[in-house]
Protein backbone atom coordinates (compact mmCIF):
# COMPACT_ATOMS: atom_id res chain seq x y z
CA UNK A 1 0.00 0.00 0.00
CA UNK A 2 1.29 3.46 -0.91
CA UNK A 3 2.34 5.58 2.10
CA UNK A 4 1.05 8.57 0.13
CA UNK A 5 -2.44 7.07 0.11
CA UNK A 6 -2.31 6.55 3.89
CA UNK A 7 -1.25 10.18 4.34
CA UNK A 8 -4.22 11.24 2.24
CA UNK A 9 -6.57 9.30 4.49
CA UNK A 10 -5.02 10.84 7.59
CA UNK A 11 -5.50 14.32 6.13
CA UNK A 12 -9.13 13.51 5.25
CA UNK A 13 -9.89 12.31 8.77
CA UNK A 14 -8.13 15.38 10.14
CA UNK A 15 -10.42 17.60 8.04
CA UNK A 16 -13.46 15.74 9.42
CA UNK A 17 -12.14 16.21 12.95
CA UNK A 18 -11.67 19.95 12.35
CA UNK A 19 -15.24 20.21 11.06
CA UNK A 20 -16.49 18.53 14.23
CA UNK A 21 -14.38 20.85 16.39
CA UNK A 22 -15.67 23.89 14.50
CA UNK A 23 -19.26 22.91 15.36
CA UNK A 24 -18.39 23.54 19.02
CA UNK A 25 -18.45 27.30 18.40
CA UNK A 26 -19.63 28.19 21.90
CA UNK A 27 -16.74 26.21 23.38
CA UNK A 28 -14.18 28.13 21.34
CA UNK A 29 -13.44 31.81 20.94
CA UNK A 30 -14.18 33.25 17.51
CA UNK A 31 -10.54 33.47 16.45
CA UNK A 32 -9.90 29.80 17.23
CA UNK A 33 -13.10 28.86 15.39
CA UNK A 34 -11.98 30.74 12.28
CA UNK A 35 -8.48 29.28 12.38
CA UNK A 36 -9.88 25.76 12.69
CA UNK A 37 -12.20 26.44 9.77
CA UNK A 38 -9.37 27.81 7.65
CA UNK A 39 -7.27 24.73 8.34
CA UNK A 40 -10.21 22.52 7.38
CA UNK A 41 -10.69 24.34 4.07
CA UNK A 42 -7.00 23.97 3.23
CA UNK A 43 -7.25 20.21 3.79
CA UNK A 44 -10.45 20.00 1.74
CA UNK A 45 -8.79 21.81 -1.15
CA UNK A 46 -5.95 19.28 -1.03
CA UNK A 47 -8.52 16.45 -0.92
CA UNK A 48 -10.15 17.68 -4.12
CA UNK A 49 -6.78 18.23 -5.80
CA UNK A 50 -5.90 14.61 -5.05
CA UNK A 51 -9.28 13.53 -6.45
CA UNK A 52 -9.30 15.84 -9.48
CA UNK A 53 -9.43 12.84 -11.84
CA UNK A 54 -12.78 11.79 -10.32
CA UNK A 55 -14.21 15.23 -11.06
CA UNK A 56 -12.73 15.15 -14.56
CA UNK A 57 -14.44 11.82 -15.25
CA UNK A 58 -17.78 12.97 -13.83
CA UNK A 59 -19.42 14.13 -17.11
CA UNK A 60 -18.64 10.80 -18.78
CA UNK A 61 -19.63 8.82 -15.67
CA UNK A 62 -22.96 10.60 -15.48
CA UNK A 63 -23.86 9.18 -18.90
CA UNK A 64 -23.07 5.65 -17.83
CA UNK A 65 -24.26 3.56 -14.91
CA UNK A 66 -22.17 4.72 -11.94
CA UNK A 67 -23.12 4.75 -8.31
CA UNK A 68 -25.73 7.47 -8.25
CA UNK A 69 -25.51 7.63 -4.47
CA UNK A 70 -21.78 8.43 -4.56
CA UNK A 71 -22.16 11.10 -7.23
CA UNK A 72 -25.09 12.73 -5.43
CA UNK A 73 -23.16 12.64 -2.16
CA UNK A 74 -20.01 14.19 -3.61
CA UNK A 75 -21.85 16.97 -5.43
CA UNK A 76 -24.00 17.73 -2.38
CA UNK A 77 -21.05 17.97 -0.02
CA UNK A 78 -19.18 20.16 -2.53
CA UNK A 79 -22.15 22.55 -2.61
CA UNK A 80 -22.43 22.60 1.19
CA UNK A 81 -18.70 23.26 1.63
CA UNK A 82 -18.82 25.99 -1.02
CA UNK A 83 -21.67 27.72 0.82
CA UNK A 84 -19.75 27.30 4.07
CA UNK A 85 -16.62 28.87 2.55
CA UNK A 86 -18.42 31.85 1.01
CA UNK A 87 -20.32 32.67 4.20
CA UNK A 88 -17.15 32.17 6.26
CA UNK A 89 -15.49 34.95 4.29
CA UNK A 90 -18.55 37.19 4.56
CA UNK A 91 -18.95 36.93 8.35
CA UNK A 92 -15.27 36.64 9.29
CA UNK A 93 -14.12 38.90 12.11
CA UNK A 94 -10.48 37.75 12.16
CA UNK A 95 -8.97 35.76 9.27
CA UNK A 96 -10.75 37.63 6.46
CA UNK A 97 -11.56 40.80 8.39
CA UNK A 98 -9.34 42.82 6.04
CA UNK A 99 -11.82 42.28 3.19
CA UNK A 100 -14.46 45.00 2.72
CA UNK A 101 -17.32 42.52 3.04
CA UNK A 102 -20.22 42.16 5.43
CA UNK A 103 -22.64 39.26 5.38
CA UNK A 104 -25.03 40.16 8.15
CA UNK A 105 -27.41 37.83 9.98
CA UNK A 106 -28.60 36.08 6.80
CA UNK A 107 -25.07 34.95 5.91
CA UNK A 108 -24.62 33.74 9.49
CA UNK A 109 -27.80 31.66 9.28
CA UNK A 110 -26.71 30.16 5.96
CA UNK A 111 -23.29 29.47 7.47
CA UNK A 112 -24.81 27.45 10.32
CA UNK A 113 -27.16 25.61 7.95
CA UNK A 114 -24.29 24.73 5.57
CA UNK A 115 -22.10 23.59 8.48
CA UNK A 116 -24.59 21.02 9.72
CA UNK A 117 -25.39 19.78 6.22
CA UNK A 118 -21.65 19.47 5.56
CA UNK A 119 -21.31 17.42 8.75
CA UNK A 120 -24.13 15.02 7.80
CA UNK A 121 -22.93 14.72 4.20
CA UNK A 122 -19.36 14.09 5.39
CA UNK A 123 -20.73 11.19 7.44
CA UNK A 124 -22.53 9.84 4.36
CA UNK A 125 -19.30 10.23 2.35
CA UNK A 126 -17.47 8.25 5.02
CA UNK A 127 -20.06 5.48 4.93
CA UNK A 128 -19.90 5.17 1.16
CA UNK A 129 -16.13 4.64 1.38
CA UNK A 130 -16.19 2.45 4.48
CA UNK A 131 -15.25 -0.77 2.67
CA UNK A 132 -12.11 0.88 1.29
CA UNK A 133 -11.23 2.26 4.73
CA UNK A 134 -11.61 -1.18 6.30
CA UNK A 135 -9.33 -2.70 3.67
CA UNK A 136 -6.67 -0.08 4.40
CA UNK A 137 -7.05 -0.53 8.16
CA UNK A 138 -6.80 -4.31 7.77
CA UNK A 139 -3.53 -4.01 5.89
CA UNK A 140 -2.07 -1.44 8.29
CA UNK A 141 -2.87 -3.48 11.40
CA UNK A 142 -2.27 -6.84 9.68
CA UNK A 143 -5.72 -8.14 10.45
CA UNK A 144 -6.20 -11.77 9.47
CA UNK A 145 -8.83 -13.24 7.14
CA UNK A 146 -12.55 -12.65 7.84
CA UNK A 147 -13.69 -14.11 11.15
CA UNK A 148 -17.36 -14.70 11.95
CA UNK A 149 -17.00 -13.79 15.64
CA UNK A 150 -15.04 -10.61 14.90
CA UNK A 151 -17.54 -9.60 12.23
CA UNK A 152 -20.48 -10.17 14.59
CA UNK A 153 -18.80 -8.11 17.33
CA UNK A 154 -18.04 -5.25 14.97
CA UNK A 155 -21.60 -5.24 13.67
CA UNK A 156 -22.92 -5.20 17.22
CA UNK A 157 -20.71 -2.22 18.03
CA UNK A 158 -21.84 -0.46 14.85
CA UNK A 159 -25.47 -1.15 15.75
CA UNK A 160 -24.99 0.29 19.24
CA UNK A 161 -23.31 3.41 17.85
CA UNK A 162 -26.08 3.84 15.28
CA UNK A 163 -28.78 3.50 17.95
CA UNK A 164 -27.05 6.06 20.17
CA UNK A 165 -26.58 8.28 17.13
CA UNK A 166 -30.32 8.28 16.42
CA UNK A 167 -30.91 9.25 20.04
CA UNK A 168 -28.28 11.98 19.71
CA UNK A 169 -30.03 13.45 16.66
CA UNK A 170 -32.91 14.42 18.95
CA UNK A 171 -30.72 15.45 21.87
CA UNK A 172 -28.71 17.86 19.72
CA UNK A 173 -31.71 19.09 17.71
CA UNK A 174 -30.01 18.29 14.41
CA UNK A 175 -33.31 18.15 12.52
CA UNK A 176 -34.08 21.79 13.35
CA UNK A 177 -30.60 22.88 12.34
CA UNK A 178 -30.82 21.05 9.02
CA UNK A 179 -34.06 22.91 8.27
CA UNK A 180 -32.74 26.28 9.52
CA UNK A 181 -35.44 26.45 12.18
CA UNK A 182 -34.79 28.97 14.96
CA UNK A 183 -33.55 27.43 18.19
CA UNK A 184 -32.42 28.80 21.54
CA UNK A 185 -31.08 25.46 22.72
CA UNK A 186 -27.30 25.56 22.97
CA UNK A 187 -25.06 22.93 24.51
CA UNK A 188 -23.85 23.81 27.99
CA UNK A 189 -20.10 23.26 27.70
CA UNK A 190 -19.60 24.15 31.36
CA UNK A 191 -21.66 21.13 32.29
CA UNK A 192 -20.13 18.69 29.79
CA UNK A 193 -17.72 19.11 26.90
CA UNK A 194 -17.08 15.47 26.08
CA UNK A 195 -20.84 14.85 25.80
CA UNK A 196 -21.08 17.28 22.88
CA UNK A 197 -18.41 15.44 20.93
CA UNK A 198 -19.71 11.97 21.85
CA UNK A 199 -23.19 12.86 20.58
CA UNK A 200 -21.83 14.21 17.31
CA UNK A 201 -19.48 11.25 16.79
CA UNK A 202 -22.44 8.94 17.35
CA UNK A 203 -24.49 10.93 14.81
CA UNK A 204 -21.63 10.63 12.35
CA UNK A 205 -21.54 6.86 12.96
CA UNK A 206 -25.29 6.50 12.49
CA UNK A 207 -25.29 8.41 9.20
CA UNK A 208 -22.23 6.52 7.98
CA UNK A 209 -23.92 3.19 8.79
CA UNK A 210 -27.08 4.27 6.97
CA UNK A 211 -25.08 5.27 3.88
CA UNK A 212 -22.98 2.09 3.93
CA UNK A 213 -25.97 -0.25 4.14
CA UNK A 214 -27.93 1.80 1.59
CA UNK A 215 -25.04 1.31 -0.84
CA UNK A 216 -24.91 -2.42 0.00
CA UNK A 217 -28.66 -2.72 -0.63
CA UNK A 218 -28.42 -0.85 -3.94
CA UNK A 219 -25.61 -3.14 -5.13
CA UNK A 220 -27.64 -6.20 -4.09
CA UNK A 221 -30.77 -4.89 -5.81
CA UNK A 222 -28.76 -4.15 -8.96
CA UNK A 223 -27.28 -7.65 -8.97
CA UNK A 224 -30.73 -9.22 -8.54
CA UNK A 225 -32.12 -7.12 -11.39
CA UNK A 226 -29.26 -8.09 -13.69
CA UNK A 227 -29.80 -11.78 -12.87
CA UNK A 228 -33.50 -11.41 -13.59
CA UNK A 229 -32.78 -9.68 -16.89
CA UNK A 230 -30.31 -12.40 -17.85
CA UNK A 231 -32.90 -15.09 -17.11
CA UNK A 232 -35.49 -13.61 -19.42
Image (cartoon, rainbow, N blue to C red):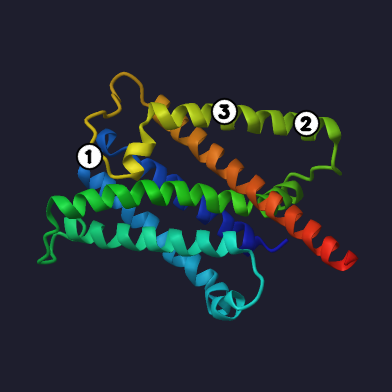
Give the mark, 3 or 2, whose residue is nearer the N terminus.
Answer: 2
Of residues 25 and 73, the one drawn nearer to the viewer in this rendering: 73
Which residue has dot 3 on it?
163
Residue depicted at 51% across the width and 47% down the height:
123
Give the answer, above or below, for where 171 lies relative to 94: above
Q: Are marks 3 and 1 in contact (CB under 8 Å)?
A: no
Nearer the camera: disc 3 or disc 1: 3
Quarter of the rendering occupied by the N terminus: bottom right
Nearer the camera: disc 3 or disc 2: 3
Looking at the image, residue 60 sits to the left or right of residue 20; the answer is right
Residue depicted at 80% across the width and 64% down the height:
226
Give the answer, above or below, for where 71 lies relative to 16: below
Q: Quadrant of residue 144?
A: top right
The circle drawn on residue 74 is none
Give the mark, 1 or 2, whose residue is nearer the N terminus.
Answer: 1
Looking at the image, residue 81 sits to the left or right of residue 70; the answer is left
Q: Residues within 10 Å of mark 1 (few under 14, many from 20)?
A: few
**Is residue 172 at least partly visible in the picture?**
yes
Residue 137, horizontal then vertical, whole percent: 70, 47
Give the SS element for disc 2: helix
The circle drawn on residue 29 is 1
Give the answer, above or below, for where 34 lies relative to 51: above
Give the answer, above or below, for where 46 lies relative to 122: below
Of residues 111 and 188, the one drawn nearer to the viewer in this rendering: 111
> How far is the residue under mark 1 from the one under mark 2?
43 Å
Which residue has dot 2 on it?
152
Nearer the camera: disc 1 or disc 2: 2
Give the mark, 3 or 1, whose residue is nearer the N terminus.
Answer: 1
Q: Residues within 10 Å of mark 2 (few under 14, many from 20)?
A: few
Of residues 55 and 133, the one drawn nearer to the viewer in this rendering: 55
Q: Quadrant of residue 231?
A: bottom right
Amino acid sequence: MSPFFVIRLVLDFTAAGLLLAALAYWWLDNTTHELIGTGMFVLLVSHNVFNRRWWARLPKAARGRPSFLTIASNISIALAISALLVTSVLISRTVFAFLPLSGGPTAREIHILAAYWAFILAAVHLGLHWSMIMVVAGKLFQVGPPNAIRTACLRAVAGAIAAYGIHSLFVMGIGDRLMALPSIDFWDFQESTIGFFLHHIAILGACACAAYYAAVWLRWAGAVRRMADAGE
